Amino acid sequence: MKNNNNHLLSKDQGRKKTGSSSISVFLRKNGEQTLVIAFLIVMSIPFIFPFWWMFTSSFKNMNEILGTLSLFPDTFRLENFIDIFTFQPFARQYFNSTYIALLVTLGIMVLSSFAGYGFARIQFPGNSALFILLLSAMMMPIEVTIIPNFFIFKAFGLTNSHLPLIILPILGSSGVFGVFMMRQFFLSIPKELEEAGMLDGLNRLGIFWHIVLPMSKSALAAVAILTFLFNWNVFLEPLVFINDIDLFTLPVALQNYTSPYDGTPVWNLQFAASTLSVIPVLLIYLMAQRQVQNNMALSGMK
């Protein structure tokens, strides 16, 4: 009986030790996780605060914005979001930015996928030299080429239109950057996959369309995100090429919310318009980011 009791006591003590050790491990892991989360929250404040300030200030009046610092408006002025449409043709300008950014993004995705695959897989005389020459376009600042481009488009009667805002990014540094990204991605795809397609009777275009392009969704999504963000925020080209307020894009339109008397910014309207202008960027980023995450495995590439 004593031996049995001793055996039971030792079992109970072992269980208690095991339970206490598991609890300590659980607390330690959760404590580390809590510290990491707290650290990330603190580090995210400098990035979140400007957006929060912009959002809350879009509901304030001018006196409240220029007065005491407050994270919340005293009264929510929804009239600000109505006034931005009556101050200037903001809806038309919003549409201008949206369709221009979408067309440029689509054009660069098509151009970069075909050109990137050509530079990566089709060997022709001067392939490397032409690619290096193409990359040199990325090193040329837009401020250097904007004046020659203006006179070229003016000679064809295309100023004060959206055509320069669509053509220049596709054939300029944005398009070159997309070609570079896609070429580097295509170089990472094993040639054995394409050779297997050739054995099945596919030609070069069929291999690109049925094998390579479906595997490139993550790279194309990255190109789409960067291209849309860049062209949504372009300021210099619309400022140079466009004079008509109905043809303005959002970056130029935002600076137009100024007082007609002394030219000072009307901050509450600028904040309200900026808040609305952020929405498409967030939507495009969230949709494309999901596509990137779903295709990070790159369809079994090893």
Image (spheres, rainbow, N blue to C red):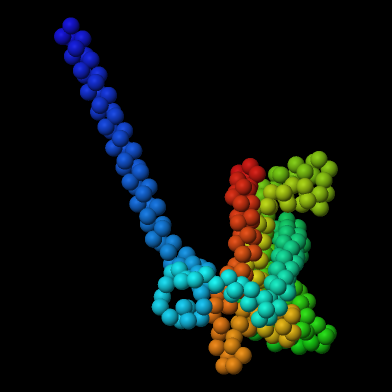
Q: In the shown orientation, is residue 154 left or right of residue 248?
A: right
Q: In percent of the image, x 74 and y 47: which residue is there? A: 211
Q: In percent of the image, x 49 and y 67: which residue is there? A: 52
Residue 5 x %, y %: 19, 12
Q: Where 18 falls versus 165 (above or below)?
A: above
Q: Closest to the observer: 108 or 242?
A: 242
Q: Closest to the observer: 19 or 50?
A: 50
Residue 3 x %, y %: 18, 9
Q: Residue furthest bottom?
A: 262
Q: In the shown orientation, is residue 141 left or right of residue 10?
A: right
Q: Where 236 falls versus 37 (above or below)?
A: below
Residue 260 x %, y %: 62, 90
Q: In percent of the image, x 73 and y 86: which residue is there? A: 243
Please indicate, yes or no, whether residue 168 appears anywhere in the rendered image.
Answer: no
Q: In percent of the image, x 33 and y 46: which residue is there? A: 31
Q: Closest to the observer: 112 or 104?
A: 104
Q: Where 287 falls versus 269 (above or below)?
A: above
Q: Residue furthest front?
A: 75
Location of the N terminus (image quadrant):
top left
Please indicate, yes or no, whether residue 246 appears anywhere in the rendered image.
Answer: yes
Q: Closest to the observer: 58 or 126?
A: 58
Residue 118 x %, y %: 75, 60
